[in-house]
Image (cartoon, helix red, strand yellow):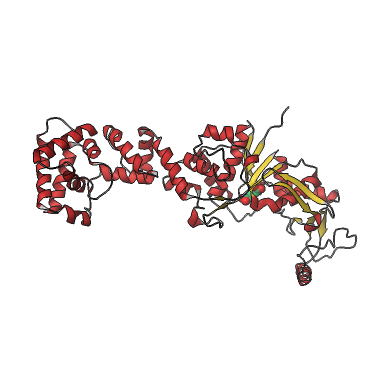
Amino acid sequence: MEEMIVTRFAPSPTGYLHIGGLRTALFNYLYARKNKGKFLLRIEDTDLARNSTDAKEAIIEAFDWVGMDYDGEVVYQSQRFPLYQEYVKKLLDEGKAYYCYMSKEELDALREEQRQRGETPKYDNRYRDFKGTPPSNIAPVVRIKAPLSGEIKFKDGIKGEMNIQAKELDDFIIARSDGTPTYNFVVAIDDALMGVTDIIRGDDHLSNTPKQIIIYEALGFKIPRFFHVPMILNPEGHKLSKRDGAMSVMEYKEMGYLPHALLNFLVRLGFSHKDQEIFSKEEMLELFNPYTLNTSPSAYNQEKLLWLNHHYLNLLSDEELSNLLPLYGAKIPQENAQKILYPEIKERSKTLQEFANLVNECVNEVQDFDVKMKSKVNTQENIHLLEEFMVYLKALKTPIESVENAENEIATFADFQGIKAKNLFMPLRYALLGKSGGVGIAPLLAALSKEEVIKRVEKALQSLA
Ligand code: GLU
């Protein structure tokens, strides 16, 4: 039987999920799902001062929003201390780990000496084969017996062959003097016990891997496959900072990004298929392959994210858009108005927030007329035109309900006044929106009721008086 692919996402609970984390989760998710395998979630909360419940909720909220799910129960490292202790004991019993009684002062002195000799500070194995009577005033740490010679080798799915000289590593600590296990120790045990076959994670973890392999080997666990993904950098080539967009996933929701746009954006930070930019979820599942991930870092490109968001926003139905609007503080227009306005507004919006703002501009009465526009519009001729237009509207027998209708009425009115239709646009835009820019005049006339248009024109005339 073919081996089942099991991946995991193992965040440390920083309270929210940032986009680098979401990309790692996405890669693991896609690889598991495309292979009908399992995608597991483990919260690395061994730092007990942090609150793991909040972290879990923050992650689940983000996963829900982007439509990613995980299998089984969430594993919390904080609940597995007894298990880790069992493995420390096992290694001690088998002579693969040992107590080290070196005091902090001794360790500091050793490091200082090594530094002065120009060497990299490293534990000197002094308790590795210690047979004497241990000092009674020192609570010992537990160290693993790392190989003394040779190489630790593994083949990284992205970076290729990795060879680390054993002499570069030391007998690192697996349990501190208070008995708590260390990071690399618990990660290796959990990945092994959870049956993880493939580990896709940021390449900031690359230097941890040889240590984890030493643990796997000491415990006789099968070593998983590793894929170390290059970081996401800002356009200047530096580590992504909050200002560049390293903020929480849920902030992207608040700013008006669509979940799939964000996923599409993230998948392309490392993955490519020919020159394709747009990937449906099905295509991601079909085409994603961790072995072909880019070997160099990817640059965060805000313009690209906006471009993708605009693309996906344009695919939403009127109903989907209406359901999303209240989240961004917009009123939902009448159905006919939706049909007319949404396509107009979609074209002009990159985010749902922009979309909502433009909807509000259309459906709400003008509160503040733009001063600059007012000074341009405030002429006898325009005031006259607006007054006449009101009279014209009031006399209309049938409502204006389509863009074509609106265009015809504007043309007829302009003919009647002996002016060009476009002369009416600026005063009418001032009356309906109170500012320049925004949705076209004909769609606005078609979307708003006749009463509403008359009301707005009256208000505009008062502002010009
Ligand atoms: N907890 C680690 C982190 O959030 C990830 C550990 C791993 O993927 O092995 O960076």
Give x and y (percent) for residue 153. Answer: 77, 47
Residue 160 falls in image quadrant: top right
Is 383 located above or below residue 65 in the figure? below
Q: Which residue: 60% across, 33% down? A: 33
Left or right: 357 as drawn, with respect to 291: left
Q: Which residue: 73% across, 44% down? A: 155
Q: Which residue: 56% across, 45% down? A: 23
Give x and y (percent) for residue 447. Answer: 24, 36
Give x and y (percent) for residue 88. Answer: 78, 50
Left or right: 36 as drawn, with respect to 137: left
Q: Is residue 263 visible?
A: yes
Left or right: 223 as drawn, with respect to 248: right
Q: Is residue 196 visible?
A: no
Is 166 located above or below residue 425 in the figure? below
Residue 386 falls in image quadrant: top left
Assign the C terminus to one quadrant of the image.
bottom left
Residue 74 versus residue 31: which sits nearer the camera? 31
Is 211 located above or below residue 130 in the figure? above
Q: What count of labels does the image hold?
A: 0
Assign the N terminus to one quadrant of the image.
top right
Residue 63 versus residue 211: which sits nearer the camera? 211
Left or right: 3 as drawn, with respect to 95: left
Residue 111 falls in image quadrant: bottom right
Give x and y (percent) for residue 116. Answer: 77, 72
Q: Residue furthest right?
A: 131
